[in-house]
Amino acid sequence: MKLTKIAALTAGVVFSFGVSTVFAADVATSDEVVAKVKEAAAELAKDATAGLAELNKKDGKFVWKDTYVFAYDCKGDKMVAHPMAPALVGQPVLAMKDKAKENAKELFKELCAAGEGAKGGWVEYQWTKPGVEGVFKKFSYAHAIEGSTIQVGAGIYDDAATVDGLNGKL
């Protein structure tokens, strides 16, 4: 009986480790987010129509692991590409607030400001996670498309990250 309990406990630990490793592999990193956002910005700068069509594909190359690239027009105040929420495309975004219970941020105003820098920038805010109840700390990287009022962004959930730390890696 004791041996059976030890075997079951060991199997449970190994299974849990294996599952957490699989889920950990499915989490986008900040470096991946920056690379994908810059790739999307370059594509949009070359051919905005084709680039926006690609960004709007739910199964496109800009949807990976647990995140995706989206695009918004800072001057035109609208979402221009969102693969996971197509109903947002064309909708105003500058007044959109994060999900914080107190002191909610005007998320897209902050993204627009962060994205204006030469390297782009990160913004911290509170947001929901798909499939999980509650509100969580999230970071999105924003990058402007040269010669355009459109910016591109993507986000990660990372409890240990800070805006200063993420911006320091740019």
Image (cartoon, rainbow, N blue to C red):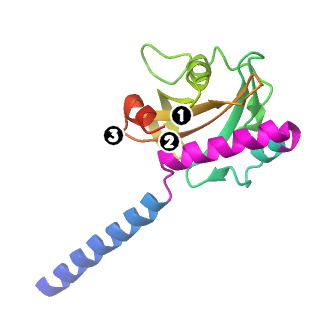
How many residues crowd mark 3 within 10 Å: few (<14), some (14–19), many (20+)? Answer: few
**Could you tell me which secondary element the residue under label 3 belongs to?**
loop
Q: Callout 3, which amino acid?
A: Ala
Camera-nearest residue between 115 and 103: 115
| Residue farthest front in this picture | 118
Q: Callout 1, which amino acid?
A: Ser
Q: Callout 2, which amino acid?
A: Ile
Check whether the beta carbons of the residues at disc 3 and disc 2 lie within 8 A of each other. no
Q: Position of residue 115 (x, y in %)?
A: 60, 26
**Could you tell me which secondary element the residue under label 1 belongs to?**
strand
**Could you tell me which secondary element the residue under label 2 belongs to?**
strand
Specify the label residue 140 is tagged with.
Answer: 1
Q: Quadrant of residue 158?
A: top left
Inter-mark Cα distance, 3 to 2: 11 Å
Look at the picture and state if 18 lies above or below 55. below
Q: Which residues are magenta?
A: 26-50
Q: Earlier in the sequence, mark 1 or mark 2?
A: 1
Report the residue at 22% width, 83% height from top: 7
Q: Quadrant of residue 130?
A: top right
Identify residue for label 2.
Answer: 156
Identify residue for label 3.
Answer: 160
Q: Is residue 119 left or right of residue 103?
A: right
